[in-house]
Image: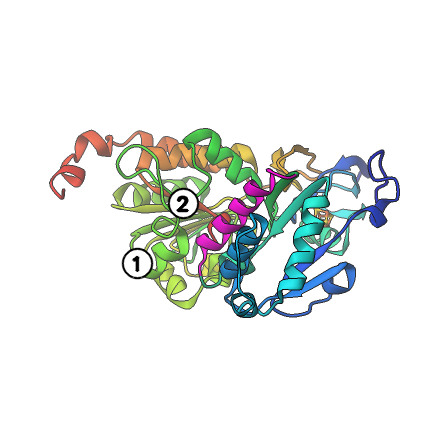
Amino acid sequence: MQKSKFLPRGRKDRTVVLVDIRETKSAKAADLFLQVRPGKDFEMLTILRAMIKGEHVTDDQVAETGLTTDVLQDLIERMKKAKFGVMFFGMGLSMTRGKHMNAAALLTLAAEMNAFTKFVAMPMRGHGNVTGADVIMRWQTGYPFGISFNRGYPRYNPGEFSTVDILVRGDTDCAFIIGADPGATMPRPAIEHLAKVPTIVLDPHVTHTSRLSRVHITTAPAGIAAPGTGYRMDEVPMPLRPALNSPYPSDEEVIRRIKEAIAEKPDWMTDQPQMIFSQV
Amino acid sequence: MELKVIENATCTFCGCVCDDIELHADDVRIHQAKRACVLGKAWFLNHTAEHKYPDALIDGQPATLEEAIQVAADHLYQADMPLVYGMSNTTCEAQRECVEMADLLGALLDSHTSL
Ligand code: SF4
């Protein structure tokens, strides 16, 4: 592992703490493994926040999370002693009981740790350029995801405007899917809704979602045959250097052309104002 | 067929986005992806420049790109609450187009992040 001016002994100068509901292979690579009871993330994070501030927490309350007061006290000491702490979090936090509130609790913890030392939180990313999607949406709309433009200006509300919820509730009547395959990963009711409404897919492959879609357009794979920019997980933009020339157009070109075809039609806002006003 | 070497290529398979990959490629496929991990190698070697799939499919039937673009635009325009979703395995330039399209449509816009 990288040795540096401030961490001359490399890995030995670093501490890795793994928090999970079961002991995975990563536990071997960690210095400390905390096995939290499933669905108790929010409780554990809140207790940590309380203990860091010196509030009284009973042993029973700690025991409910599957951990002990001593273990948490030791963790807090290590955290406060760190020069620069990073909390990496994944879908285990945001897809279980509590969902967005778990992530919010973790972000608050990271913010509060800055009273003692430098601390940040960073979501772990599975797919290529999800970070880029966050950055671009933040730049263009002010919000990172879960956005609705249906009043003509962007509004943000995860849970209401997040895709799984939209699809499970059956709110949308047309889906445009790019660089994703929800037909392979989403819960059944969500997939069933995608099959019911006209779905449009842009992908280098004919995917599960393409098979239940009305329109599939094959595009050049980004980074392999299409140029552009991709963001690394820590929000550093990287230029892509494609090695191949694809017989297919890039995503960028296809979306631009669809957008132009839509722009030729009358503006829905001025043309059908009753859509927004008569229903209020 | 000419063999090209691309230095410092970027892998976009996972969030690490390694940018020190050395690619050896001819016109059709990538033969070697040095310094990439197992996942990255599979990602680079599995994509080719062949015309493997039809340009577009409408209701499961092969169609031209132009037709597909028109049909897609019609569906999106006619919808009361269209959804634009995904944007992971694509470029920032394409993501920007997505935002503009969602704005134009009055659509819902969301990425993998919400999962
Ligand atoms: S080479 Fe491996 S670790 Fe690096 S971006 Fe590609 S898949 Fe991720």
Residue ID at (66%, 33%) = A238
Q: Quadrant of the C terminus of chain A?
A: top left
Colouring rule applied to residues: rainbow
Rendered image quadrant of residue B2: top right
Q: What secondary structure characterizes most of the magenta part?
A: helix
The residue at label 1 has a CB less than 8 Å from ligand 1: no
Residue at mark 1 shares a chain with residue at mark 2: yes
Mark 2 lies on residue: A146
| Element type where label 1 sits in the image | loop
Measure the C-alpha gap from mark 1 to mark 2.
Answer: 16 Å
Q: Amino acid at mark 2?
A: Gly
Rendered image quadrant of residue B10: top right
| Element type where label 2 sits in the image | loop
Q: Is residue A115 magenta?
A: yes
Q: Amino acid at mark 1?
A: Gly
* Range shown magenta: A98-116
Side of A264 relative to A222 (left or right):
left
Residue ID at (30%, 29%) = A264
- Looking at the image, residue A227 lies above or below residue A40: above
- Looking at the image, residue A39 lies above or below residue A248: below
Mark 1 lies on residue: A170
Q: Circle 1: is it few (<14), some (14-19), or many (20+) Cα within 10 Å?
A: some
- Which of the two discs, 1 and 2, labels the residue nearer the N terminus? 2
Chain of residue at mark 1 = A
